[in-house]
Image (cartoon, rainbow, N blue to C red):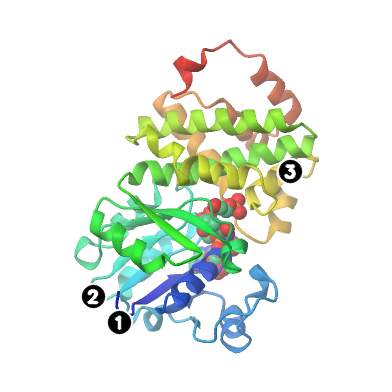
C-alpha cells in the first residue's frame, strides 16, 4: 500500500494510539484536537500526558488545531471523538473537506435522543460523493496497551468489502491485526452496548461479588446485547466475534476500562457526578445506557441488566437491591432467551 495521509480526529488515548499504529505502518498520521494546549504538547514534547502519561510518541505524528489544515489532501479521516461530539465534528468536516476520502470511526456509543449508530450519523452529515462507505473500527483494544504495541486483534466493518480491506491493510502490522466484517450493525452495536455491561461488571466487583457473578453478567450481558442487536438487523454470530465477546471480556474484566472503573466506583458507593468529574475521560456507557434503555423499550426488547444500570444511573436506585430484583424475577429458559 502506498503511503497514506490520515487525519485522526480526537487526540484522546484511543486517537493517539491509533495515530501511532498508522505512523508505525509508514503512513502520515495527523492528530486533530480542539484543545490548543494539547496540540502544543504533542508537537513540542511528543507526549499526550493527560491521556497516556509520559510516553513519547514519534516526532512525525503532528497535531493540528486547524481542521482544514489537518484535512488538506488526506486519503482518509478517522473519527475518534466521544459519541456525543461525532455529529458536531462531522458537520465541521463536511464544511471543509473538498475531495473524496475514506471515512472511518473507532468510537463506541449510540446518539442521545435519536439512538442512532455512529455510522448512521456520519452517513447523514457527510454526503456520499465525499466519502467511502463508512468503516467501523472496533474490538478488544485498551488504548494503553496499543500505545505500547501490545498484541491486539480487532475488526474493521463496512458494507463495502473493499473499504473494509483498505482499513485492514492500513492498520495491520506485527502487533495489530485487523479482521474484516460486513456486519456494520452488529459490530457497532456490540461495541456500544458492551460499555453498559462493563459498568455492571465493575459494579459487581466494587460491591465485592466473586468470579461467578462476573462470568454471569458477561454471559447474560452478551445475550441481551445480542437480543437488541438482532432486532436492529445484526447477524447474531457477530456477537461471538472480536467486537462482541472479545470486547466484553476486555472491558468487563479490566481496570484499564473507564466503564469498568466507573462501575467499580459506583459499587463502592461513589456518586456518578464525582466519578465523571474524576475520570477526566469519556465514560461512554453512561449515555449509552440511556439510549439503549429507551431503544429497547421502544422495540419491546428485554434487557434486564441494562435496566438495572439505567435505574442506578438515572433513578438513583440502590445497586444491591436492583441486583436482588433481577435475581428473583420470573424464571427463564436459557434456550428461549439466549437471543
Ligand atoms: N480509550 C480506549 O481504550 C478506547 C476508546 N474507544 C472509543 O473511542 C472514543 C474516544 O475515546 P478516548 O480516546 O478514550 O476518549 P477521551 O476521553 O480520552 O478523548 C477524546 C478526545 O476527543 C476530543 N473531544 C471531546 N469532545 C470534543 C468535541 N466536542 N469536539 C472535538 N473534540 C472533542 C478531546 O480532545 C479528547 O482528547 C470513545 O467513543 C471510546 O469508546 C474505543 C476503543 C478503545
Ligand atoms: O472499548 C474499549 C476497549 O476495547 C475501551 O473501553 P473503555 O471506554 O471502558 O475504557
| Left/right of residue 237 with respect to residue 259 in the rendered view | left
- Pick the residue in front: 258 or 176: 176
Q: Residue furthest left?
A: 129
Q: Distance of mark 1 from mark 2, alpha carbons?
A: 8 Å
- Pick the residue in front: 93 or 18: 18
The residue carrying pointer 2 sits among few (fewer than 14), some (14 to 19) or many (20 or more) residues within 10 Å by Cα, namely: few
- Pick the residue in front: 167 or 75: 167
The image shows residue 233, relative to residue 192, as above or below, that is: above
Q: Residue at x 49, y 45 (%)?
A: 192
Q: Distance of mark 2 from mark 3, alpha carbons?
A: 46 Å
User: Which residue has dot 2 on it?
Assistant: 99
Image mark for residue 39: none
Q: Where, quadrant-wise, is the C terminus in this rendering?
A: top left
Residue 220 seen in the figure = yes
User: Which element type, helix, strand or loop, lies under badge 1?
Assistant: loop
User: Which residue has dot 1 on it?
Assistant: 73
User: Which element type, helix, strand or loop, lies under badge 3?
Assistant: helix
Q: Residue at x 59, y 10 (%)?
A: 330
| Left/right of residue 328 with respect to residue 17 in the rendered view | right
User: Which residue has dot 3 on it?
Assistant: 264
Tell me which numbered mark, 1 or 2, is placed earlier along the sequence. 1
Q: Where, quadrant-wise, is the N terminus in this rendering?
A: bottom left
Amino acid at each position: 500500500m502506498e503511503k497514506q495521509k490520515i487525519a485522526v480526529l480526537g487526540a484522546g488515548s484511543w486517537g493517539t494510539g491509533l495515530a501511532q499504529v498508522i505512523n508505525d505502518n509508514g503512513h502520515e498520521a495527523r492528530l486533530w484536537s480542539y484543545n490548543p494546549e494539547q496540540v502544543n504538547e504533542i508537537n513540542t514534547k511528543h507526549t499526550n500526558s493527560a491521556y497516556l502519561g509520559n510516553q513519547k510518541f514519534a516526532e512525525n505524528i503532528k497535531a493540528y488545531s486547524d481542521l482544514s489544515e489537518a484535512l488538506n489532501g488526506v486519503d482518509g479521516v478517522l473519527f475518534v471523538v466521544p459519541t456525543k461530539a461525532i455529529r458536531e465534528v462531522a458537520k465541521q468536516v463536511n464544511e471543509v473537506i473538498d475531495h473524496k476520502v475514506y471515512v472511518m470511526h473507532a468510537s463506541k456509543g449510540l446518539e442521545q435522543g435519536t439512538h442512532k449508530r455512529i455510522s448512521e450519523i456520519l452517513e447523514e452529515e457527510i454526503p456520499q460523493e465525499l466519502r467511502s462507505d463508512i468503516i467501523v473500527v472496533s474490538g478488544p483494544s485498551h488504548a494503553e496497551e496499543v500505545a505500547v504495541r501490545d498484541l491486539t486483534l480487532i475488526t474493521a466493518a463496512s458494507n463495502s468489502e473493499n473499504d473494509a480491506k483498505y482499513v485492514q491493510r492500513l492498520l495491520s502490522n506485527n502487533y495489530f491485526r485487523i479482521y474484516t466484517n460486513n456486519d456494520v450493525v452488529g459490530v457497532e452495536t456490540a461495541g456500544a452496548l458492551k460499555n453498559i455491561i462493563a459498568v455492571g461488571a465493575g459494579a459487581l466487583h466494587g460491591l465485592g461479588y466473586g468470579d461467578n457473578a462476573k462470568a454471569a453478567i458477561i454471559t447474560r450481558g452478551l445475550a441481551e446485547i445480542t437480543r437488541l442487536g438482532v432486532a436492529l438487523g445484526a447477524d447474531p454470530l457477530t456477537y461471538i466475534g472480536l467486537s462482541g465477546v472479545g470486547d466484553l471480556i476486555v472491558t468487563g474484566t479490566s481496570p484499564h476500562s473507564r466503564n469498568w472503573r466507573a462501575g467499580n466506583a459506583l459499587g463502592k458507593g461513589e456518586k456518578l457526578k464525582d466519578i465523571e468529574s474524576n475520570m477526566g475521560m469519556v465514560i461512554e456507557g453512561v449515555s449509552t445506557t440511556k439510549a439503549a434503555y429507551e431503544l429497547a423499550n421502544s422495540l419491546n426488547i428485554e434487557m434486564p441488566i441494562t435496566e438495572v444500570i439505567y435505574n442506578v444511573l438515572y433513578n438513583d436506585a440502590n445497586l444491591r437491591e436492583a441486583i436482588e430484583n433481577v435475581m428473583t424475577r420470573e424464571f427463564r429458559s436459557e434456550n428461549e432467551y439466549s437471543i
